[in-house]
Image: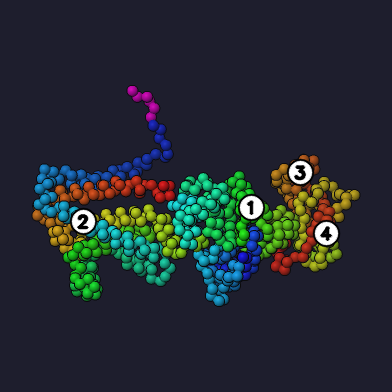
Amino acid sequence: MSVVVDGAVELDAFRLEVTLTAQPRAVLAVLGPNGAGKSTLLRAVCGLVPLASGTIGLGDDVVDDAGRGIFVPPQQRRVGVVFQDHRLFRHLRVLDNVAFGPRARGVPRAAARVSAAEWLARLGLDELAGRRPAQLSGGQAQRVALARALAAEPAALLLDEPLAALDVQTRAEVQGELREHLRDFAGPTLLVTHDPIEALLLATRIVVLERGRVVQEGSPADITSRPLTPYVARLVGMNLYEGRATGTSVALDGGGHLVAADAPAGRVLVAVRPSAITVHTEQPHGTSARNAWAGRVAGLAPLGDRVRVSVTGEPAATVDVTAAAVAELGLGPGAPVWLSAKATDVAAYPAPAEVAGGLAG
Amino acid sequence: MRTGRRRRRTGPGTPLLVVPPAAVGVLLLGVPTLAILVRTPWSRLGTIYHRRGVWTALRISLESSLEATALSVLLGVPLAWALARLRMRGIGFVRALVTIPLVLPPVIGGVALFDALGRFGIAGRPVHDLLGSDLPFTFAGIVLAQTFVAMPFLVITVEGAFRIADRGVEEAAATLGASRSRIFARVTLPLVAPAILLGTVLCWARALGEFGATLLFGGNTPGHTQTLPTLVLTVFNDNPADAPALALPLMAVAIVVLGTLRDTWLRPLASS
């Protein structure tokens, strides 16, 4: 079974327009900033909010078709949801929380408890069976919420920022477990997140949502190497420019130009990794880098064992250097520098129509 | 021996502003209660209870108030849900209509019941045809009168709880395949259970002490429609010195019930 969304949701002044397909056994991450409409998309898929137009298909069934007046309520969609705030039933023990789905589908109490116990065991949560949700840590609660969703034997699984409320340590643990359980799940999974690392780690495919629109879709490798919007570029830590290519040289809209190894003709986006740019105190000579330009240090920020330097110039760029290099080159704010980058590290690819003209600034 | 160690004060301390009004409040509520105990003719209790038919009136009070409470829960909880959750025109008018008995003097409630269900009331004929008898001056009549006065207490208490109850878990239950009725019974009701309990107690206390509507609509027939509060009127008219004795059974019932429920009240469902 796959999930196919091609429609729009309207909530007050907000409009979400999405076309996407989630394949069985695949994890499709929906990545986007707050307010992009990610959760609204999930709510539409599981039937908590109706489409204003278009259709949603689950496998062979159309569960929402605004035009034909079809709307299958959430009870009959067999779509499991794990919410950011776990939404466990606080008056029920963990075991009965997990048994709730089977019970709702008519399984007798004893049998439902047996199957709930099996799910808890499979997820390594046996010893929590007798506890109340109030006695669980955040990580435990999210694991139980996943068990509860899976125990209802859904045809598709939706995860709404399942790790966002967890502390860093717990998040890493649950992330690892989630990866395994999602691999075992036969249906499609939609994972909503605003954390690119989570998307890269868990997803087989990524859809980027901004202001209610899909702005990019692709494999994790596509997204990281060829971001299509400033938001995506910032998420994956890339320098992104827009310009017009003539041969292999791209005249950038914001000033300056960069030479790529290869470029399609016309409007292009140009992406350069911060670690692919080299900083010099003087104009570089005798280097193989085909791009060199002058700039001025605007600021420095620590980034793990390196330092991220933002440089103004044409074009402006963020550059990753070692802490030693900062001292060696005397990189303080306001320091004049030269930057260089090899043509092979400059990726030029066609600009999408929607982004054209919208990148500068 | 004094160790010189005093319990150290924590927090910002007691604001002096609250002390005098609080003390006056205690006096206002406490003195009349104590006065009843002081004036109770302890030596003649047995005689009074026997001669005045107090035990019968107490039984009728308990039975009628419990039936009124049961009726209120049965009708009031679904009504509270409707008021809290239904999005339709006129729901505000309905809310006003069903909470009016809260502010109405109960004796007016009695008049209103007569106008509605009395032999010449606007719904009196169909009721008579349905039941084969009249409602006023019957046991069913006093149950109805108490329900009319007490149910709004339950409705507003529970309505507030339905309004603030977490809708998120109801959505979660829906995605797990639970029908609307199942969500209501298994998720929403447990969420608001503390409020239902509180509303039930308030409602029952109000029904047990009900006087005005009961007297007017139910009458004051000993052994039939005479409750303890309406018996107090009879005794007080007759011999005021005997009246304090009648307060004791009601106070005893109140203390026993509140004492049993206190733990349940103070301990929210979530932490149990």
What residue is pinned by disc 4?
A: A260
Mark 4 burial class by Cα count in 10 Å: few <14, some 14-19, many 20+ = many
Residue B5 colored magenta? yes
Residue mark closest to the camera, 4 vs 1: 1
Q: Chain of mark 1?
A: A
Which chain is mark 4 on?
A: A
Q: Secondary structure at mark 2?
A: helix
Q: CA distance from mark 1 to mark 3?
A: 33 Å
Could you tell me if the residues under marks 2 and 1 are in contact, i.e. CB atoms within 8 Å?
A: no
* C-alpha gap between disc 4 and disc 1: 37 Å
Residue on which disc 3 sits: A322
> Which kind of residue does numbered mark 4 sit on?
Ala
Can residue B246 be seen in the rendering of this structure? yes
In the picture, the disc for residue A179 is 1
Name the residue beneath numbered marker 2.
Answer: B61
For the point 83% across and 59% down, which residue is it?
A260
Task: Looking at the image, tell me whether mark 1 or mark 3 is earlier in sequence order.
Answer: 1
